[in-house]
Image (cartoon, helix red, strand yellow):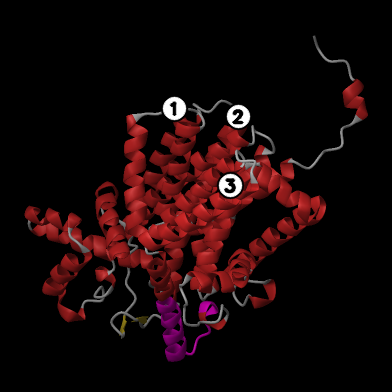
Amino acid sequence: MAGPATGLFFYSPKNKRFFRPMQHITIYDFLLLPVYLYIFYIIIKRRSFKLEDGELRKYFMMAFLLRMFGSIGYSLMVQYYYGYGDSFTYYSGGNFIIDQVQRDIGNIDHLWFSSEDLQRAYTIQEGDSGWLNGYISIPSSVAMMKISAIVSILSFNKFLITSILFGLFSFAGQWKLFRVFDNINKGKNRKLLAWAVLYTPSIWFWGSGLMKEAICLGGLGFICHILYKIFIRKKVSLRDLLVMAILVYIIGLIKSYILIIFAVSLLSIFFFKMLSIFKNVAIKALAVLAFLFSTLVLAFVTNIAEQIQILAEESKAQVDTYQRNYEVVNQEDENSEAGVSSKEIDASIPGLILHSPVAIFNCLFRPFIWESRKIIIFLTSLESMTLLFCTLYLLVRLRIFRFFKVVFSNEYILFSLIISLLFALIIGFTTYNFGAIVRYKIMLLPFYYFMLVSIYNTIPRKINPAIIDRPQPV
C-alpha cells in the first residue's frame, strides 16, 4: 500500500514513478451495496436457524455484521484516505484479465497464465508505462488478480461489492474456526472466546475486503475445520477433501509460508504425542534429533528462506513507498515515521534463532501506546496492550511453571502456541512498519486468543456453597 492520498499522486516503487490516485468506488457501488447486503443478510439469517442455540446464533450474526462493516470500512479507507492500496492492484489486474476476455473469448486462457506470461500480455497491451508493470509479474499478486476477476462475475465488476464478497468468505472460514475452538473447549467461556476470536477489531477489519489476508484467514479456517472433522470426529467426505485441496492450492499460491508454518505446527504436535510413548531417555533423544533433522529437511525442500526473503522484500517495498510519499508531500505517515527499524534480512536458520525473541515480541505486543501518532495505530496499540496484559495476567496467575505445564498437557493449546510463535517470528522478522505488522499478524491472533482462553479455563473457580447445598431437581 502506498502513502496517504494527496489528491495529486502516489509513488509506485515497481515503476519508480508517480501516478494519480484512482477512483474505483463509484455511485454504482453505493447503489448496489444495500441490495447485496440485504441478500447476504437473508442468507446468513437463514443459515443461523440451523445453529443449535440462540447464543450461537447471536454470535454468528454479530460476526457477520462486523465482517461486512470491516469490508466496507477498509475499502472506503483505501479509496478516500490512502488513494491507493494492494486491493486496487488486485482489482485492476482482475479488470485487465476481464477486458481481455471481453475482447476475445479465447483470452480466457489468461486465467491460467503464469505471472511471466501475463506480464508479457500486459506489456503488449499497455506498454512500459502501465502502472501495473512489476506488480503483475509477482505470482502471489497474479493469483489475487485472477480470483478478483472470477469474483467480479458475481459483483458486476464493482469494487465495493467484490470487497464484501471477499469479506463474506473470510467470515465463513473464521466462523468454522470458532466452532472448532468452541467444540474443543466444550462450550466453556463461549462468550469470551467469541469476543476474542470473532469480535477483535483487527481481525474483522484487516481480515476483510479484497486482500490476501481475507482469503488466507478464511481458507485456513476451513482447512482447520475439515482436519478436525477428519481426525477428531472421524467424518470423511470427498467434498471436504476436494475443498481442502483447492484451498491448500490457493493459499500456497498467495502465501506459501502460511502452509509451511501450519504443516510444521501439526508435525510438532504429532511428534510430542509420539514422544510420550517412549520411556527410554536415549530413544527420546534419538526421536528429538530425528524430528529436528526432518524439520531442517522440510525447511530446505520448501525453500523457507526464499519465502522469508520475499516477504521481507514486499514489506521493504511498502516502507520505501511510504517514505517516498512522505518526502514529496511533506506529510507525516505513521507507517514510515513509527515502525520497526529496517535492516538487511538474514533468512538463515541461525539468523532466525538469534533474532527470534525481539521479532516475536514486536509482532505480538507492538506498537505501544506512546508509539502511536494516528488514531488507527492508537486503536491498534490498545489491542496490543490488552493482549500483553492478558498474557502477563495468566503467567502471574498460574505462575510460569504451571502456565507451561497446562500448555504441554493439552495438544490443542500447544499447537496454538507453536503456530502463533512461528507466525510471530516470521512476521516480526520480516516486517518493518506497524501498519503491515497489524495486517499480517491477524493470521495468528485467533490461535493465540484461543490459547489464552483455554488456559484461562483451567483456573479453578470459587464455588458458592449455597449453590452446592441447594437441592437438585430429580
In this image, 354 relative to 2: left or right? right
Badge nearest the viewer, 1 or 3: 3
Disc 2 residue type (three-letter): Gly
Disc 3 residue type (three-letter): Ile
- Quarter of the image with the N terminus is bottom left
User: Please, what secondary structure does the residue beneath circle 2 have?
Assistant: helix
Looking at the image, which residue is at 29% across and 58% down?
143
Q: Which mark is residue 235?
A: 1
Count residues near mark 3 (Cα–Cα under 10 Å), then give few for <14, some for 14-19, many for 20+: few
Expressed as whole percent of the image width and height from the top left, the position of residue 212 reads 39, 59
Task: Work out whether residue 445 can be spotted.
Answer: no
Q: Which residue is mark 2?
A: 54
Q: Which mark is residue 283?
A: 3
Q: Earlier in the sequence, mark 1 or mark 2?
A: 2
Which residue is nearer to you in this view: 106 or 376?
A: 106
Q: CA distance from mark 2 to mark 3?
A: 51 Å
- State which quadrant residue 202 falls in: bottom right
- Relative to 100, is 167 above or below? above
Looking at the image, which residue is at 56% across and 78% down?
340
Expressed as whole percent of the image width and height from the top left, the position of residue 301 reads 36, 60
- Relative to 362, is 164 above or below? above
Badge nearest the viewer, 1 or 2: 1
In this image, 456 relative to 427: left or right? right
User: Please, what secondary structure does the residue beneath circle 1 have?
Assistant: loop
Q: Which residues are magenta?
A: 316-335
Q: CA distance from mark 1 to mark 2?
A: 26 Å
- Relative to 180, is 286 above or below? below
